[in-house]
Amino acid sequence: MKLLDAPQPAEVAPPYPDHVLLTPGPTPIHPRALRALTRPMLGHMDPEVFKLNRAIQADLREMYGTEPEAFTALLAGTGSLGMEAGFANLVEKGDEVLVCANGSFGRRMAEMAARYGAKVRLVTAPLGEPINPSDVADHLGDAAMVAVVHGETSTGVLNPVPEIAELVRHSGALLTVDAVTTAGMEPFSMQQWGVDYAYTGAQKCLSAPPGLAPVAISERAFARFAARRHPTPLWYCDFEGLRDYWVEHTYHHTVPVNLHFAFAEALRAALEEGLPERRERVRWMGRAITEALAPLGFSPYVKREEARLPTVLALRLPEHLDDAGVRAELRRREISITGGLGPTAGVIWRLGLMGEAAHPAPYRALMVALEDILGAPGLVRRFEAALDAGSA
Amino acid sequence: MKLLDAPQPAEVAPPYPDHVLLTPGPTPIHPRALRALTRPMLGHMDPEVFKLNRAIQADLREMYGTEPEAFTALLAGTGSLGMEAGFANLVEKGDEVLVCANGSFGRRMAEMAARYGAKVRLVTAPLGEPINPSDVADHLGDAAMVAVVHGETSTGVLNPVPEIAELVRHSGALLTVDAVTTAGMEPFSMQQWGVDYAYTGAQKCLSAPPGLAPVAISERAFARFAARRHPTPLWYCDFEGLRDYWVEHTYHHTVPVNLHFAFAEALRAALEEGLPERRERVRWMGRAITEALAPLGFSPYVKREEARLPTVLALRLPEHLDDAGVRAELRRREISITGGLGPTAGVIWRLGLMGEAAHPAPYRALMVALEDILGAPGLVRRFEAALDAGSA
């Protein structure tokens, strides 16, 4: 094994700048995860890896607030694969699936459910507004599954999952929740609420490297899966195959071991910080940013405060702001923020406050740049004052 | 952003030994890939990442020997997802698929094809023997696809893909080839042979970290995909979604950017070493190992030399060797090799010679350990002499 190439070879397609990522994901990788990423390689069937996997499963139960024996695992793919695995395993041709679709990710759920043969019905809400639980109640019928995105990344809306879960709980329908922008940072309680399948992406609230989708599956969901009439098409994420590997320790497919190394450290770091402390940290950051930008005409896009997703701060832009121009100038200065999507393009900015992004330092960099670009003296000072007035 | 935690927090589930991995995958990560893995994070829609992706696509065309304009990409999952994506996109309900199944991975192909609704017919061969092309000719009929594993990891057999391709070429069937243990190390020529879909895993012959499946899709395969009657269930790897991201640069899902960083370096390192040079390196190593172990009663498991897979050396064990005991003792000394699978358990060892595993140093460690464990003086000396006699 060569340990060092000498002379150092040229990199493919440089440069790779040290960039300030303030988007709705991916987030900057937690330093502890970064260190673990380069550990010497082990095989996916090695005892050290199974021991690590058990620790990951236990920590995921805590993060998702599951029943003590709930099945948790990492899928070897990104958050969208987590979404797909739920429909692939828990929906059969002809099943009625009620999808709460008040943004891009809700609509993606509807498309996936349809691809697996579901009869899809939609509950919608006006752009920037949460799903109304009474609309879910009205359309529940004999749905086999209800699916909802907890935090809609595309609009910064937090849907009322506990209220929806309460309605679904006794209906016989399974409840699938997209926890991509919430789990690990926002309160999430699968057992207490009655969620049957939840997933997120490693690179969101946990600031682990992308490429893994942590999932949790209730016993009720596993029983539904076990009663399938036909195997799921999706061999790669077949729940039985997952259980073979994660519980029985038999080979299913090669899991990405280094990503497991890094993920375990990022998740443990989150639990050691404390989920309530993380919840407070994102709110503290969100308030400081909002207060600092308010005098420039930025205002919360989502009207009702309880419907604002704290981890993706959606701010309505002041009139006459050159959205594309300002973001391009920020990009030139190696700072990324994200605009709206579709109908909100040019209307809002979406600022990521997940995991390692939700710290003063990277947002200080944004404020310094904006103070200069927008010619807005006092912006940095207001941001610092708001941080000082709040508490993490 | 905290740049260093002080004091250093305890790792999750240690220890993590510096292990000698000589299995059929994953392989030790190439040092150049390891360095790239920890680059500062960028977003999946950042221009630097699209530039890198274009370089990866060009290098993959070279590795797979495709037509100049063939579509290549990385799937955000492991090799099995590469296998699945082929059937998911190129097979529709009722299609006849002829699967060459002379090992575990051929049988996995058959299972996946069936899950996507194919009528599957099998061509088999006795254990440890390659598929006979005339059997393919006899069963071709009006198959919509023929699928074959180039190198059967489970038995160390190299199937005659060029001869099979020649038969399939004018039949109207698509040809899917599992290149997991070959592409990047063994000759592979998609265009010249007439292969329509090929895939591998990043952690095999290229020694990139696991979690990516590099794929190549012929224009003919894309045309078949475009003529589908129904969308594929597999949204995550839908060929159109892949093309949206890799060619049109529109969002489909969050690709694992750090894995792209590492993969690009590992692939470029392979091309800079030279594919013919890598081909020679693995043969040189295989000869030296075989010669060194022969006096102890180890012999090639695959009888016909041209049917031996150079990257997974399958050796029949001497009688009375305590397979499980010796491998456990090796494991205690932090060296992993792999035994047989199913009917070859206790009969063979499988030694990985892919990527960074195919160097003298890690196999020297194996020989030193075996000389001691087996009480076989001269083993290391024979190995060194055979290396000296050969040439890399």
Image (cartoon, coloured by chain):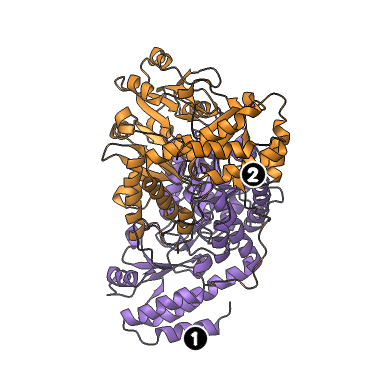
Chain colours: A purple, B orange
Q: Which residue is mark 1?
A: A385
Q: Nearer the viewer, residue A209 or B285?
A: B285
Where B134 falls versus B272 (above or below)?
above
**Kind of element beneath mark 2:** strand
Q: Amino acid at mark 1?
A: Ala
Report the label total: 2
Other residues around mark 1 within 10 Å, as few (<14) / some (14–19) / many (≥20): some
What amino acid type should be assigned to the residue bearing mark 2? Ile
Q: Residue at x 69, y 31 (%)?
A: B323
Please determine whether, in this image, residue B241 is positioned above or below residue B161: below
Q: Is residue B247 left or right of residue B18?
A: left
Can residue A243 be seen from the camera position used here?
yes
| Residue picked out by circle 2 | B335
Give x and y (percent) for residue A73. Answer: 61, 47
> Which chain is indicated by disc 2?
B
**Mark 2 or 1, closer to the camera:** 2
Same-subunit check for callouts 2 and 1: no
- The label shown at residue A55 is none
Within the image, what quadrant is residue B315 found in? top right
**Is residue B249 toward the left or the right of residue A89 in the image?**
left
Report the residue at 40% width, 70% height from top: A315
Q: Please provide percent x and percent y for residue B322.
A: 72, 30
Q: Secondary structure at mark 1?
A: helix
Q: Chain of mark 1?
A: A
Q: Is residue A204 left or right of residue B136?
A: right
Task: Residue at 48% x, 44% y: name it.
Answer: B77
Q: Is residue B253 at all visible to an observer of this figure?
A: no
Distance in Å between CA atoms under marks 2 and 1: 57 Å
Position in image of residue B372 (x %, y %): 71, 40
Circles 2 and 1: CB atoms closer than 8 Å:
no
In the image, residue B106 above or below residue B213: above
Quadrant for the C terminus of chain B, please: top left
